[in-house]
Amino acid sequence: MAEKLKVATCSLAGCFGCHMSLLDVDERLLELLEIVEFDRSPINDIKHISQPVDLGLIEGGVCNAENIHVLHEFRKMCKILVAVGECGITGGIPSMRNSFTLKECLEEAFVRGAGTENAHIPDDPEIPLLLDKVRPLHHIVKIDYFLPGCPPSAEAFLYFLTELMAGRDPSLPQELIHFD
Amino acid sequence: MYPSLTIPVPDFLDSIPVEHRKDPHALLQILIQIQHAYHHVPKEAAKRLAEEMGVPLVRVQGLLSFYSFLSPEPQGDYVIHFSDNITDQMLGNRGLAAHLCQRLGVKLGETRKDGRVSVHFTSCTGMCDQGPAALVNYLPVTNLDQERIERIADLVNAQIPLQDWPPEFFTVKSQIRRSDVVFRKPIEPGEGIRASLERGGAFLAEWAEDLAPSDARKHHLERGGAETLKEIYRSELRGRGGAGFKTGIKWESVRDAKSSDHYVLCNADEGEPGTFKDRVLLTDYADMVFEGMTICGHAVGSKTGILYLRQEYWYMKEHLEKVLSRRREAGLLGKGILGTALDFDIELHFGAGAYICGMETAMIKSIEGRRGIPRRRWPLPVHQGYLRCPTVVNNVETFAAATVISAKGGAWFAHNGTGQSTGTKLFCVSGDCERPGIYEYPWGVSVHEVLRDCGALDAQGVQVGGPSGTMINTREFDRSACFEDLVGTGTLMIFGPQRDMFEAVKNFALFFQHESCGLCTPCRVGTTLLANYVRKFEKGCGSPVDLKEMQNISGLMKTMAHCGLGQTANHHITESIEKFPAIWKGRMKTTEFIPAFDLDGALEEARNLTGRTDPEAHLAPDHAPMEA
């Protein structure tokens, strides 16, 4: 049989909902694993992409410095990079903070928040610095495909992967991108 | 303080006839009056109007947010709008506006603290051949230069009322540089409508026997109208607004549509930047335009005509009303025109700053007192237009041509021009040339010939038909202006060899972003994305990836946008990429995608908040991503 499609996935400023939806393929995961092989992914807890892969699936937008490092690693190592889900494509829910300044957000959470003790904005070097605005992925790197949905359904993931494996340009049919 | 700004709002509203105040169709026209009186629409006035008209307050607020010359917030006693077309920019309007702001101590887009003055930019005001131009309290001031700006600053600071400003500031010249067969010897007032009425022929004896006198007169009128329609067909006249639809077919559809009322609307919205022929026609040949509308009324069986003017042409109101009343006195308008059974009269309606209102269905909504948002063109306005009645909507120049055709005959008219574009056309020439202004040529004239006549043989490019039209380079100067080749509104904005065409592209992109009505996503989002990409290239962050994406977006807009605005609001992008590739390539510092903003700079706010300086608090420039 043909060589397996090497896939890496990650969640940046997302909720892991897209990954949960991917797992909703249920028992078909076994069939899926016949054709794809996961590299770095929260599913197997591999921390870095070990070698160049065919496909990168990224959920979530970009909200901090670490997200940028990860996104750059993916762009460097993935032949095809896909923005998965609302947050990856538009910034989504996390980008609702964009209508406030970062100072307002952090002070609301860590200074003025109810029951806050030792009120101060966290400054530990362990914590990645936040960007002034939450960005969709395509603001930072070139994105090859967008897989819409909040989250995209398991069927949409399957359809996308099988089309790509078949060497076709994945274009989702209406029923997979019709949400209301 | 301006005296007019101090009238109590209730008194002002009381002065408006009550039948208008109760008619929601008059809403926009009343709001314009209020805007002129108070330089904004006070909340109190909006509320009372909504109550009297029996419409929700949001309907009033909807108009305030849609039309750019209506403002819910107070403006200065002097409201100054600088025209910001590319032709104004090439003549230095940006520097002049900045200087005026500095002299007046006011920020652009804001009102000075003492409420004296506000300064804004606005889309093209139609004075491209005599720019840089501005509107001061909605009246055009042309040929701005350093000296005029200094004077304006002094006049505003000294609170001199506008009527005491130097009258030459407000001079608007017609600048007709070349006339051809139509405008060399214009039609005398009455000549066209008389010819149209006379086509009814002699009263026949048998009518008198068979019909009552009033029916005979009606029969005579209808026969004349039908004959005039034939002349329009014979002339093969096509609409002068840009789309070039056959006028005869349009008129006949309205004539045949069964309804108690039919309407004749004349579109003088003329918002396409670089276009100013309607302004000149209405200034020098208003009779021909009104007469064309009357002839149309005769041909299609309508009693009411409406001339819809853009707000920028408010200054012509008095002049046009004079022409109308002169025509009424001469028996050329009103009841029983020239002693026949023809009744026809014309009213003026104004827009309030919205390019989209040049689109016929948007214009109809605007005349009905609504937000000018285009609707689907089915049913067509010829079947259900203004007030859902059969409606002719034609351009100013089309009606002027109809007058000529009625007076001189369709065959005479069709003699000029090319096979599919008969007659002559007015061209609006502006930009880098020695003699900007209006040029009349038979259709089919080559761009090169126009450039030669206006003194611009060194041009590197011409924008034909305004931003929504076609951008051409020197290799295409032999193309001819006609419906078979370069169509459009007859607008030529010329760019000399010293110009950076990118500036034009940027101007057009920002123009469309501002003027999209927001109804459909391809246009609302597409125009913004295109403008963002143009800004990205301006910053030197563009790459071939972005260029390809701009073309994708343009293709989407072309096929998916709801109306002509969105479908054409990408031409400047695709055509400049094709015809002036250097302006894009020259701005690419990278072949690979890079963000439009500084990544490390995006951490600056967080660094300041946390006081962190460790290496992890920075994104090194070598983080520029590598493509796989």
Image (cartoon, coloured by chain):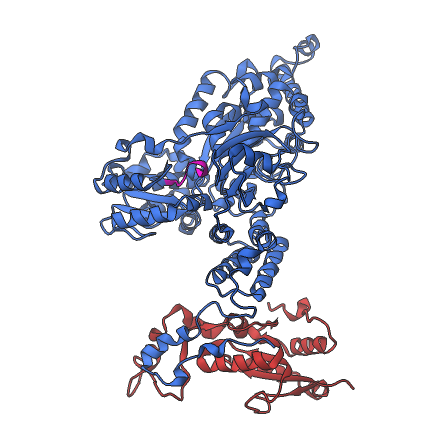
Chain colours: A red, B blue
Please provide percent x and percent y for residue A71.
53, 79
Q: Which residue is drawn at 39% across and 85% down?
A: B615
Q: In this view, does A120 lie to the left or right of B433?
A: left
Camera-side residue of B50 and B461: B461
Q: In this view, does A156 lie to the left or right of A139?
A: right
Camera-side residue of B104 and B577: B577
Hey, which quadrant is residue A132 in on the image? bottom left
Quadrant occupied by the N terminus of chain A: bottom right
Q: Is residue B249 left or right of residue B314?
A: right
Q: Residue at x 68, y 10 (%)?
A: B204
Camera-side residue of A11 and B448: B448
State the extent of the magenta-drawn residues as a range: B127-134
Please provide percent x and percent y for residue B445.
62, 33
In the displayed structure, B614 sits above or below B294; it is below
Hey, which quadrant is residue A43 in on the image? bottom right
Please provide percent x and percent y for residue A148.
59, 71
Quadrant occupied by the C terminus of chain A: bottom right
Camera-side residue of A112 and B620: B620
In the displayed structure, B428 sits above or below B520; it is above
Please provide percent x and percent y for residue B520.
55, 55
Residue A168 seen: yes
Residue at the left extreme? B158
Q: Is residue A161 magenta?
A: no
Q: Is residue B356 left or right of residue B259?
A: left
Residue at the right extreme? A1
Q: Residue at x 57, y 78 (%)?
A: A75
